[in-house]
Structures are given as C-alpha cells and as structure tokens.
Image (cartoon, rainbow, N blue to C red):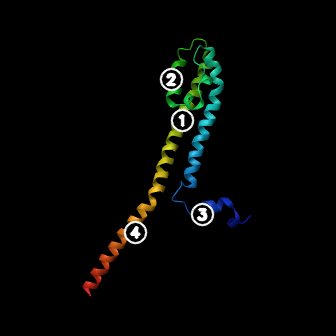
Amino acid sequence: MRRDSCPIAESKSAPRSPSGPSLQVRRKAGLARVALLVLSTCLGPLAAALSLAGEESLAEKPPAEQLTLQSVQDRLKGLESAQALDEATKTKLRELYQQAIGELEAAKKWSESAARFESMATSAPEELAKIKADLAVRDDRDGRKASNAA
C-alpha cells in the first residue's frame, strides 16, 4: 500500500484545525475514557463481594458517581474493617483498588493534558497573529534604521 493513499498517514500529515483539538489530543482523551471504562468493568464484580460484607453496593450508584478517586480510596480504607472477607479476598481487592487509583490518577493527568492542549490549539491563531505583528514592527524598525544609515 502506498503511503500517500493511507488514511492514517494523511491524518498525521493533515494540518491541525484551529477550531478543534489535534488527533493526538483526541486520542489521549479517548484513552482516558477507555481506562475509566476498563476500571468500572473490573470493579463491577467487586460490588457483590462488598455487598456481602454489608457495604453499600457499587451497582446502586450510576457509573459516573461510583468511580472517583476519592470513592476508591475510601473503599480501600474500609477494606481493612470488612470482617466478612477472608485475607485472600482482601489482598486481591487491595491490589485492584490500588490499580484503580493509579489508573484514575493517570486518567486525570491525561484529561488535564488534553484540556491544556485544547486551550493551546484554541489560542494558537491569536498568538500567531500577535507574533506576526511583532515581527512586522521589528522589520519596519530595521528597515528604517537601514535607510537612515544609508
């Protein structure tokens, strides 16, 4: 397959639109969403184990509320006091909660980066115009100095 006919190569070489985020920013935001989806899928089976321990079921809350950094940290702290769970289950849950915390922190960083890049992409045309104007003023000044010296 020729490189010039590849849609992926075309999208990488295509100019960025000032009105929207770049492909790389959209991919990072998409990865953050996928990470959240994977975590919510992994933590779903834990809801049954926690409800057996007399804890509030994760399934009773909508997904947007159940998967926050604070809620996972709270569940990790509450795990030690769960008496209905054996040590093997607690160990596995602890590992999963720590993994979830790491993934949520990474997703937060990616989301912040995506927002920062989107802001930069939005302000880029204004900054470019300002830089061009500054360069034009400098060129005018340099041109005047050269003509005055001659």
Q: Residue at x 69, y 62 (%)?
A: 6
* Separation of residues labelled 3 and 4 (CA atoms): 24 Å
- Circle 4: element type: helix
Query: What is the quadrant of the N terminus in the image?
Result: bottom right
Is disc 4 surrounded by few (<14), some (14 to 19) or many (20+) residues within 10 Å? Answer: few
Q: Which residue is mark 4?
A: 132
Amino acid at circle 4: Lys
Q: Which of the 4 quarters of the picture holds residue 89? A: top right
Residue at the extreme bottom: 150
Q: What x and y, as percent, mark residue 86?
A: 62, 14
- Circles 3 and 2, Cβ within 8 Å, touching? The answer is no
Q: Find numbered disc 3 in the image and state the secondary structure of the residue it sits on.
A: helix
Disc sitting over residue 104 in the figure: 1
Three-letter code for the amino acid on which mark 2 is drawn: Asp
Q: Residue at x 52, y 18 (%)?
A: 78
Tell us which disc is closer to us: 4 or 1.
Answer: 4
Q: What residue does disc 2 label? A: 74
Which element carries disc 2, helix, strand or loop? Answer: helix
